[in-house]
Amino acid sequence: MSGTVVSNVFRTSGVIAATAAGISFESTVTTGTTLSVEAGRGYFINTTSNICTVTLPSSAAAGDQIVLVDFARTWGTNKIVIDSNGLNFQGQDDTYVVEYNTSGVTVNIVYSGASKGWTPISDDVVTDAPAAPPTQRALFGFGYGASGLTGATNLINSSGVAATDTSAVGTARQNLSATNYGGDKAIFAFGNTGSVTGISNLVSNQGVVASDVSAVGTASSNKAAASYGLDKGIFGYGATGDGTGLNISNLVSNSGVIGSNVSGVGTARNALAAATYGLDKALFAYGADQISLKNLVNNQGVVGSDVTGVGTGRSALGAAGYGGDKAIFGYGNGANTDAVLSMTNLVNNQGVVGSDVSGVGMARWGLAAAAYGGDKAIFGFGYREGQGGSSYKSVTNLVNNQGVVASDVTGVGSGRRWVAAANYSYSA
C-alpha cells in the first residue's frame, strides 16, 4: 500500500487498510472507456468524450476502499458505469446496473463483506444505485384465432425473434392484458372466456406460464396494463360484461399479487393501451370510442386526471416501452371499425405524447406490444380483413431504440387477435 495512512481501520484479516484520507491517488487522469481499479487507490475520471466503465476488483476484504472523482464535472453528460466484477454492490449482485450520472460527484466506496458488498460511504446519488438491469425477452399470449379462444403463448428472444406456439396453461381467453412485475417476471390477467373474468396467470423469469390464480377485483375485459415503480404493475380501465366502461385500477405487487379495486380517475373506457416511461412511471392512452387522451401514473401507482389531444383517437392498439425510458403507441382502429391504422405516437421520458407518425407495416387492430432486448420494442399479432389468407395475423414489427418501426416480419405461430404481451427476464 502506498501513500500516507491516516485514521486507519482494520480489515477482517487484521491488515491495516487506508481510509479516504490515506488513499493514494493515481496521478494520471483516466479518459478511456474502461478502467480497472484497485483497493486503496483513488482515480480522477474524465468523461468529456465518452462513458467510462469502471471494473472493481474480483476479490476484496472488509475495509477495502476506492474513491472515484468526476474530474471534469461531466458525468451528467457521460456517466460512469460500475462493474462489481462478481461481488455485490449495496446488497445486489452484479447483474444489477450501477451507474453515476450526476456532474461533480465523488464516489467513495468501501467493501463491507460478502452480504452487502461494496457500499458507498459518500456519494450524491446513493438511492439511484444499483438499478435493476433491463429486461431482455418478451412473450405474447392468449387471444382469439381461426380455431377460437386459445391460451397459447409465443416467446420472443433478446433479438426479437418469435418462437412457435407453446401449449396453453391456464384458461383460454381473449381481451386480456399483461405487464411486467418484480423486474424480470410477467403476469396475464382479466379477459373474456365467453364471459368476463378476473383470473390471472404468473409468468416466471424463464417465460413459463403458471396455472390460473383466482380472480381479484371486478371481472372485466379490454383493460390495459404497464409496469411502474421499477418492480410493480398496474391494470386499469376496461369494461364489464355488458360493455360498461370502467375507470378503476388494480395494483400488482413485486410478488405478482393483484390488489383490490382502486377508484378511478379520468374517463371510463376500454380497448386502450398502456406503457412504461421515464423508468418508473406509466401512462394509459386512447381507447373506445376512439378517444384521444392520456392519464399519467406516478411511481407510486397513482393515476392522474385526463390530458386531452394526444394524436388521432383510436382503440384496440398496442403500446410498449423502448429506449430505456420512452414509450410508443401504435396501430389500432380509427374513427370507425373500418378505419384500421398503422400510425404510431412516440412518448418522451416526461410522458409527453408526440404527434402522429405515418405507419410502417400492416395496419391492424387487436394486437399487443412489449419491450425486449434491453431498449427495443415489438408489436405483434392482430386482425385485418382483406389482406389475403387468414384475417388473424401473426405478423410482428420490431421497434429500434430510437422508436423507428421496421417492416413486417412474417409471423411464427398461430395468428390471432385480442392478445396480450409483456417483457420478462434479465438474461439474454
Image: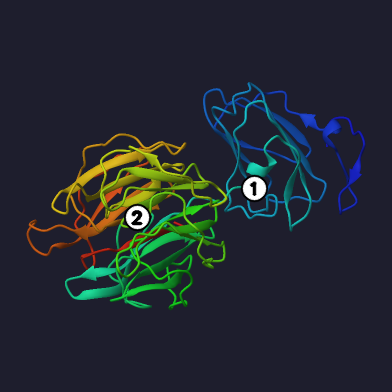
Residue placed most toward the observer, 274 or 186: 274
User: Residue at horizontal 41%, vertical 67%?
Assistant: 188
Q: As drawn, which residue projects farthest toward the right? A: 7
Q: Secondary structure at mark 1?
A: loop
Q: Nearer the viewer, residue 424 or 259?
A: 259
* Lateral position of residue 114 relative to residue 206, left or right: right
Q: Can you see residue 425? A: no
In which quadrant of the rendered image does the C terminus lie?
A: bottom left
Mark 2 residue element: loop
Q: In the rendered image of this protein, does residue 273 appear above or below residue 258?
A: above
- Measure the C-alpha gap from mark 1 to mark 2: 47 Å
State the residue position of label 1: 84
Q: Quadrant of the N terminus?
A: top right
Q: Amino acid at mark 2?
A: Arg
In depth, the one of 361 and 175 nearer the eye is: 175
Residue placed most toward the observer, 375 or 55:
375
Q: Answer whether residue 234 is visible to the viewer in this image.
A: yes
Residue 41: x and y in percent read 76, 35
Q: Is residue 326 left or right of residue 100?
A: left
Q: Quadrant of residue 192?
A: bottom left
Q: Where residue 269 is drawn, which disc sits there?
A: 2
